[in-house]
């Protein structure tokens, strides 16, 4: 990995994701830190990235590297973790039953991925699917249920969710720009994951057999 990527591009990209992930646009712009469970999910995701060889921590910090290089590597690791936590903060509803259901859903998916010992491509694909599905559920489905008026999507959801207490599913009305900011943030995060210093399969096998 090029020095500029490790020292500048990756930290700036992930710190931008961490900032945008906590940004809430309403009558005024506020910053929401990640809840404790988002930190747990972020730690689990980092474990998935290591297990799936998306990131090789020893290529960022090791005894063979200079102190400044290790410092750069530490910044990349920490910024990746905080970006992951803020991504979960971003795609999880704010409160109520959806908040609980989303967290359980994401926790189960990450546990399953950790147990599967996936390869790098599978992990990146899974992250795109998981975050994309959560984005659609929060910003499109729940957004339609919570918005005023009677749009086509809202009427369809009323029919599909007949018998459910819609009051437990609705969330605060989202600003029109919120979905676009979230989509850009998720895209930046996935690009950052693809740029992380990875371990090849042959290197992983050598390390396991050592």
Image (cartoon, helix red, strand yellow):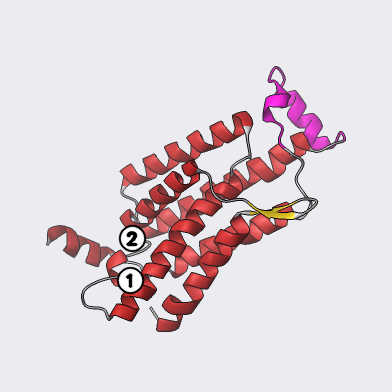
* Cα–Cα span, label 2 and label 1: 13 Å
Please name which of the two marks, 2 or 1, marks the residue nearer to the observer.
Answer: 1
The kind of secondary structure element at disc 1 is: loop
Magenta residues (range): 149-171
Q: Position of residue 135 (x, y in %)?
A: 62, 47
Q: Position of residue 38 (x, y in %)?
A: 49, 45
Residue 162 horizontal side relative to residue 77, left or right: right
What residue is drawn where x is 62% and y is 30%?
96
What residue is drawn where x is 36% and y is 68%?
74
Residue 59 horizontal side relative to residue 136, left or right: left
Can you identify the residue that label 1 sits on?
60
Q: Is residue 71 magenta?
A: no
Seen in the picture, residue 10 relative to 112 is either above or below; the reply is below
Work out which quarter of the rendered image holds the N terminus and state it: bottom left
Label 2 Cα neighbours within 10 Å, binned few <14 / some 14-19 / many ≥20? many
Q: Position of residue 43 (x, y in %)?
A: 40, 50
Can you identify the residue that label 2 sits on?
53
Q: Position of residue 33 (x, y in %)?
A: 57, 51
The answer to which of 188 and 27 lies nearer the viewer is 27
What residue is drawn where x is 46% and y is 48%?
39
The kind of secondary structure element at disc 2 is: loop
Give residue 153's quadrant in the image: top right
């Amino acid at each position: 990995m090029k020095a500029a990527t490790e020292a500048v591009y990756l930290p700036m990209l992930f710190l931008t994701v961490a900032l945008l992930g906590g940004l809430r646009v309403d009558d005024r712009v506020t910053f929401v830190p990640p809840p404790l469970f988002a930190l747990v999910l972020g730690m689990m995701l980092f474990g998935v990235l290591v297990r799936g060889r998306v990131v090789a921590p020893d290529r960022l910090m090791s005894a063979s590297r200079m102190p400044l290089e290790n410092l750069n590597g530490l910044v990349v690791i920490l910024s990746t973790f905080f970006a992951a936590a803020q991504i979960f903060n971003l795609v999880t509803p704010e409160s109520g039953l959806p908040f609980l259901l989303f967290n359980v859903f994401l926790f189960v998916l990450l546990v399953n991925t950790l147990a599967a010992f996936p390869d790098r491509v599978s992990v990146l694909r899974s992250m795109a699917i998981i975050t994309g599905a959560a984005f659609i559920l929060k910003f499109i489905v729940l957004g339609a249920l919570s918005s005023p008026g009677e749009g086509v999507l809202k009427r369809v959801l009323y029919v599909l969710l007949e018998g459910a207490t819609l009051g437990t599913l609705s969330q605060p009305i989202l600003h029109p720009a919120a979905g676009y900011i979230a989509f850009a943030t998720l895209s930046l995060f996935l690009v950052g994951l693809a740029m992380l210093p990875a371990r090849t399969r042959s290197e992983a096998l050598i390390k396991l057999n050592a």
